[in-house]
Image (cartoon, rainbow, N blue to C red):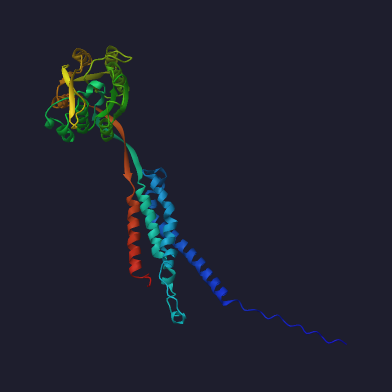
């Protein structure tokens, strides 16, 4: 008989201690990442709670005035890593022979929340980015009842408006004194200042504007947004349209067309020009008939008296302006006829003071009409993000200095 063969049971090998420690460290890292992400979502939710609760569905219609700033949100992951895991890696280290002395090192809740300050800073920066993007909400459009006049300003931008209109700088609005003290203002410069001052003094008149040279163009329909209208007028230049000729008929026709649908009792066209009608598709006579049909009065303000006027033609080697005299033809008879036949009045302004007085004298005895005008109210919403962001930064500083300090 053969002897029985003995079988040895395999001896289980113990796992490598270093491999076991690495698995433990990996598990702890995963737990730390999960906890950090959960805390980030929780803090972000708390920070956004006030903006969302205060406006709700209105955020769907919010306009972001500087939406390109929102690209900064793409940097938040970098900030998150830099202020949490990256901060720990940047800490100085010291090699030690044994860790037995650190067995009693802190392992409680504060250790698990050591990434909270970095999370607070990341969310705070996100809130500041949203604030810098300038969210603006239209809080509503209401019909404002008021009394006023419908006015259309027709401003001449022909080349003759480059002539100098001298006068006492103190007679011009304050916004123009600095420039007039250094350089003699042209007719168009003075007209812009006076018209802007005129618009700023109105309270409930709907005012529109057209500009004309060889052709007429609408600058703004009648509006109560005086700030926008004044800005548009201030940006006018003689070279923005063809100013080689003067189309007074087209200017009046375009202005009257803007007033055709108006229900105001008083409709006014204020014509500011220094020339004669020598271009356009419509004659001044046709425009006068249309003005009579819609009940619009034309107040013609003649700038200059037709005499030779100085025009800047360049500068000398020392940078001083050089002027030469040129004859600027004007047709006061035509302007007076337009004003008389439409029930308006003809004014002649030879300096800034006369131009300003003419503009304000026009509206002294006009009958006002009650109307409704829609006004949109805009509200800046950036404080809804700034306040939570500031609170998060303050909380981060408090935690770093008190509960969650890092050593060394």
Image x and y of residue 361, in percent:
15, 24
The front one of 197 and 363 is 197
Image x and y of residue 256, in percent:
29, 20
Image x and y of residue 206, in percent:
26, 29
Res. 85 visible in picture = yes
Q: Quarter of the image containing the N terminus? A: bottom right
Image x and y of residue 156, in percent:
25, 22
The front one of 320 and 133 is 320
Count the labels in the image: 0
The front one of 164 and 103 is 164
Is 408 left, or right, of 35 in this rendering? left
Task: Give the quadrant of residue 269.
Answer: top left
The relative height of residue 151 versus residue 38 in the rendered view (above or below) is above
Q: Quarter of the image containing the C terminus? A: bottom left
The relative height of residue 13 versus residue 87 in the rendered view (above or below) is below
Res. 257 visible in picture = no
Q: Residue furthest right?
A: 1
The front one of 344 and 73 is 73
Q: Residue at x 21, y 33 (%)?
A: 200
């Amino acid at each position: 008989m053969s002897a029985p063969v003995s079988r040895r049971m395999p001896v289980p090998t113990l796992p490598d201690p270093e491999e076991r420690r690495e698995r433990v460290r990996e598990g702890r890292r995963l737990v730390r990442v999960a906890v950090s992400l959960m805390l980030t979502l929780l803090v972000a939710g708390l920070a956004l709670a006030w903006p969302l609760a205060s406006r709700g569905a209105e955020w769907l219609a919010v306009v972001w005035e500087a939406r390109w700033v929102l690209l900064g949100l793409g940097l938040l992951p970098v900030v998150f890593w830099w202020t949490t895991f990256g901060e720990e890696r940047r800490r100085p280290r010291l090699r030690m022979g044994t860790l037995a002395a650190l067995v009693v090192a802190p392992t409680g809740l504060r250790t698990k929340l050591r990434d909270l300050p970095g999370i607070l800073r990341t969310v705070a920066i996100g809130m500041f980015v949203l604030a810098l993007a300038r969210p603006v909400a239209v809080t509503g459009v209401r019909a404002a009842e008021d009394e006023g006049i419908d006015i259309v300003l027709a401003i001449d931008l022909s080349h003759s408006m480059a002539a100098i209109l001298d006068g006492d700088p103190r007679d011009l609005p304050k916004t123009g004194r600095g420039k007039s003290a250094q350089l003699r203002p042209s007719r168009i410069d003075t007209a812009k200042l006076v018209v802007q001052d005129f618009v700023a003094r109105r309270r409930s008149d709907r005012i529109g504007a057209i500009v004309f040279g060889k052709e007429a163009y609408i600058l703004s329909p009648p509006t109560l947004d005086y700030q926008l209208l004044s800005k548009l007028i201030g940006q006018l230049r003689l070279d923005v349209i063809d100013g080689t000729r003067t189309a007074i008929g087209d200017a009046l026709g375009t202005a009257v067309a803007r007033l055709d649908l108006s229900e105001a009792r008083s409709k006014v066209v204020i014509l500011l020009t220094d020339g004669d009608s020598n271009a356009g598709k419509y004659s001044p006579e046709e425009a006068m008939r249309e003005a009579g049909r819609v009940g619009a009065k034309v107040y013609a303000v003649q700038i200059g008296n037709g005499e030779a006027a100085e025009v800047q033609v360049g500068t000398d080697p020392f940078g001083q302006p050089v002027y030469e005299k040129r004859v600027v033809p004007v047709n006061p008879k035509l302007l007076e006829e337009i004003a008389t036949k439409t029930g308006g009045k003809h004014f002649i302004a030879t300096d800034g003071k006369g131009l300003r007085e003419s503009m304000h004298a026009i509206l002294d005895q006009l009958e006002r009409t009650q109307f409704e005008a829609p006004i949109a109210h805009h509200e800046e919403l950036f404080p809804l993000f700034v306040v939570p962001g500031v609170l998060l930064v303050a909380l981060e500083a408090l935690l770093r200095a008190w509960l969650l300090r890092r050593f060394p």
